[in-house]
Image: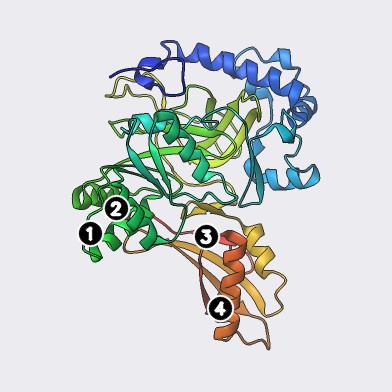
Amino acid sequence: MSCIRGSPLYDPICEAPADWGAVQDRLAVLAVRYGAMRSREIRRRLDRAGVAPEDVRDRAGLAAIPVLAKDDLPALQAAEPPFGGMLAVPVGSLRRVYRSPGPINDPEGRRDDFWRMAPAVWAAGFRPDDVVLNTFSYHLTPGGMMLDSGLRAVGCAVIPGGVRNTSAQIDAAYAAGATGYTGTPQFLLTLLERAREAGRKLPFRRALVTGAPLPPPLRARLQDEFGVDVYQSYGTADAGTIGHECEAKDGWHVSIEIVVEVLAPGDHRPAAEGEAGQVVVTSPNEVYPLVRLGTGDLSAWNREPCACGRTSPRLAGFWGRVGEGVKVKGMFVHPRELAGALARNPAVARYQAVVTEGADGHDVLTVRVEAAHGAALGEGEVAALAARIRAAVKVRAGVEVVEAGTIGDAAGRVVDRRG
């Protein structure tokens, strides 16, 4: 297996350091010291904790700094737009500015493959001259460009499919002989099934999926029924790629350029081996440095040697969420966005979004609503509610009108009932 050194395109089996801990210590020190100089948010958090930048001499020193929850970013950015004092460079020096559900503004710097996707793309088996259909959104949210930049760094030709337009995407992939796919695993299944119904066999041989759970039965079906070798990557718009699968498909190898902690929810102590904890990221990114950003995602460490030979530690996979947001079809659905669409509607007394997994493995979002006393929710009103919800959360939802008293006062506004 070859390595291409000195560029974003490298094989982590060759690049992972022998002393991973020493590299993590250096990254932690750099992130704190650079962040203290360039990020007002990091400086304020250090001051409140009584921590001087020079006090942090290794990754263990991060424990003195409070975790910043990702769910706090919308309020932080609203108070100090557009990035809540977290940006280390002038806004005008960015390549692009995105707006993710939350809402959260996300920067893209001018460095190629800004989110470090190339290692995940390479580990999934994509190579120069592969043609890949990228089905993440290129509109406002950064998912499309995140994958696009990694694919282009490897040398792939990209079909910028974006979301929806299933028939057109099948036509484009078929015409170009696309051998690869990037997107959610559920949409991959949709494309393959729709193509088969039309008497076509898409030429996909491999896929890199993210943004939604990949249950083992769905992975097995994509492999056995359609012949697609599926790999996972894991990351966020703010932290970039956090981990990715190798050919062993036994957890996510942590990115070489960031510090990852897995902290027990509530007390923020390091989670024990195999114990679920929140993934917390520290990154000395020159544009958007992060110090202990809590992603809200739950995972655990898997420190057993990997059969692929890579020396990086691995996360065990996605084990749920601790924050408010729930990812549906690759997009976060937040209670505050539902509130913006429904809370001020006088015809709606209570509401609750429920995420389930359909029989075909697809995410299903249903918003249950109780009509206010004396109000009627007919077909027209329900359709209007569905349109408002879709505009707010960027995901199509079914609206189910339920009897008064069905949704309790203490019921969660977003409930995840998948697996």
Between the residue at mark 1 and the residue at mark 2, the CA separation in whole angstroms equals: 8 Å
Mark 2 is on which residue type?
Answer: Tyr
**Badge 3 or badge 1: first in the primary sequence:** 1
**Badge 4 or badge 1: first in the primary sequence:** 1
Residues at circles 4 and 3 in contact by the CB criterion of under 8 Å: no
Q: Which residue is mark 2?
A: 174
For the point 68% across and 23% down, which residue is it? 64
- Residue 173 on image: x %, y %: 33, 51
Which is more foreground, mark 3 or mark 1?
A: 1
Position of the C terminus, as image quadrant, is bottom left
Between the residue at mark 3 and the residue at mark 1, the CA separation in whole angstroms equals: 38 Å
Q: Which residue is mark 4?
A: 383
For the point 69% across and 26% down, which residue is it? 65
User: Which element is circle 1 on?
Assistant: loop
Q: Which residue is mark 1?
A: 200
Mark 1 is on which residue type?
Answer: Arg
Residues at circles 1 and 2 in contact by the CB criterion of under 8 Å: yes
- Residue 39 on image: x %, y %: 74, 28
Q: Is residue 252 visible in this depiction of the protein?
A: no
**Badge 3 or badge 2: first in the primary sequence:** 2
Residues at circles 2 and 4 in contact by the CB criterion of under 8 Å: no
- Residue 383 on image: x %, y %: 56, 78
Mark 3 is on which residue type?
Answer: Val
Residue 360: image quadrant is: bottom left
Mark 4 is on which residue type?
Answer: Ala
User: Which element is circle 2 on?
Assistant: helix
Q: Which residue is mark 3?
A: 415
